[in-house]
Image (cartoon, rainbow, N blue to C red):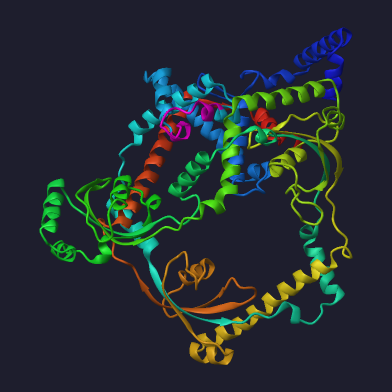
Amino acid sequence: MLSGIRTAAGTWLGKIVLTVMFGFLIVSFAIWGIGDIFRGYGSNSLAAVGKSEIGIDAFRRAFQQRIFEIQQRSRSFTTEQARLIGLDRQVLNQMIGEAALNEKAGKLGLAMTTEETARLLAAIPAFRAPNGAFNRAAFDAYLREAGLTEGAFLEQQRLAMLRQQLGEAISGGYAAPQAMAEILHRYRAEERKISHVVVPGAIPSALPAPTPDQLKAVHEQRKGAFRAPEFRKFVALVLGPGEFAGEITVSDADLRQAYESGLASGRFGAPEKRRIEQIAFPTPAEAAAAAERLKSGLAWTALLEERKLTPSDVDLGVKTRSELVDRAVADAAFALAEGAISDPVQGAFGPVLIRVAAIEPGAAPDFAAMRETLLADVRASKVAGDRELRRKLDAVHDKIEELRSAGKSLQQISEELNRNLIVVEASDAGARGRGGELITGVPDAADVVKAVFQSDRGVDNEAIRTRENGYVWFEVLGVEPARERSFDEVKAAVEDVWRNDEAARLTTENANAFLKRLEAGETLEAIATELGGQIEVTANVTRNGNDAIGPSAAATAFALPPGRYAIAATGRGSDRMILRVDDITVPEFKPGDADSKALKIQLDSTLSGELLTHYVMGVQNDLGVSINERALASATGTQNLR
């Protein structure tokens, strides 16, 4: 339809017809009440906070960016899933809160010049070259990827910095009560000693064959699990900066610099680790005095005894440089030789002395073995920042868009420009083919397929921007609706489900029989002997479990009093375990040790965030908030689902 309108708009007669047609549509909307979409809002407004408005386009960008961030960790995450977990409302609420703080900052007279904002941004590591200078190419690449102009980006950052100033004034420096930290420590640090014996699970493949009626019952109960998903056929035209990579020269010096940078950041290889011990002091003077005594011959262990500390009290563990949160401590610790003791270091929590008890050297991969990987990475980085290549790519992009505006299909464009057209015969919403295999050949396939499933046949779609700053155009050629598979189609899969369910049921019944015998007074040792196994004893189990006791079994154990038995899953097929809690211990809370301090910082941050949240809610109530629900439904795609 859009391509037809584009074609019509190319003639003088078409322009007149379209002008008259849309004029009638606008008038009819006003007559028949469609104009209520806009009353009380701007034409592109989704919500209003006081005198500020949140635009539909701004919300869409923020919503899609949040989805993109999640997809970096879980590629199968879709827009529909985002709506189901309320991500759209979370994003909107965040934008409303930011708008409220922006207005409040303005009313309070908080200000920051564009020059000052630019100066602060120039110091951001992501925008700095290896020599420390501002990296204009990296900054421009970020703006292109974010779809922002330089002015819009600076304004965003200026407002963000003002919000940060206001937030710090409200909740900065908030400290949680020590008693609260102790209660949380006791909950998290509680440990249990657990004895358990494994009840071997029934083997699914060894079970007697199920009857047809049993299989049909499973199929009927779980038809949704055997349902065939919707498949779509589409074509894709791809344009990426990699096409111009051959024009980029990469020197050995470039590769060596990337190699050294990768080693330093821990991106590849095994970084150096150190066992670090740290003694904290109330004042710099006490730390300096202790350091002088150590230089004069006082042993480190003797200093620990004087200060009534044990080795475990001062042991920070085996850490890499990046694992140490306190930068001052990290720099000092990784500058020492093995066994050496530092001068006083002003850490984040006060003055400290540091001792390196042991060093585990890092393992660096051979430069020659990394050469091809480094070459690809450096070339991709140079391509992304090369303005001349970007102009060439943009020229091809503009030519493709020009041909699309002329009403040509992607098939016709690929033939005219001699570009390869990718045909995907069938893909489900998870970017998998009929056999469950991931589709190939399409960059950022998950994003492209998501857009394919939000489109339809005959729809003129916008190009998708890829992560490497390229483009993918697509057209939907066919839609095969989701359907329920017949029993005969999925009989083998149904039998697998039945066998696994039956094995779990039989094993649980067997375990319950043993549990009743234990509750009647029989010993766990006798049960273990009958099962041909042995009792396994695991100490120091926390609520998160460990290698021997997984999270599920740990949760069961932490719901039991000492001496009682329960059944839990092992995480290994249909096996079950019968477990008993033998002992409960709660490590002492020591406010001065590293873990307790880290817990206190986390708790302070959480409560500080809660305080700021309540403040923002109060500001919103004072300013007034209204949401255009119809615009929100349209922006998230739910309008078409109703």
At a point 51% along the width and 55% down the height, the residue shown is: 366
Quadrant in which residue 615 is drawn: top left
Residue 587 lies, with reference to residue 565, above or below; the image says above
Residue 183 lies, with reference to residue 232, above or below; the image says below
- Please check the rendered image and state whether residue 408 is part of the magenta-colored stretch, yes or no: no
Direction from residue 387 to residue 555 in the image, left or right: left
**Percent from the top left, x then y, of residue 392?**
68, 25
Q: Nearer the viewer, residue 427 or 387?
A: 387
Direction from residue 350 to residue 610 in the image, left or right: right
Quadrant in which residue 455 is drawn: top right
At a point 37% along the width and 44% down the height, the residue shown is: 605
The residue range painted magenta reads 125-140
**Percent from the top left, x then y, of residue 423?**
83, 42
Q: Is residue 622 visible?
A: no
**Percent from the top left, x then y, of residue 247?**
65, 32
Residue 4 lies, with reference to residue 128, above or below; the image says above
- Please check the rendered image and state whether residue 129 is part of the magenta-colored stretch, yes or no: yes
**Percent from the top left, x then y, of residue 276?**
30, 58
At a point 58% along the width and 89% down the height, the residue shown is: 531
At a point 53% along the width and 27% down the height, the residue shown is: 137
Quadrant where the N terminus sits is top right
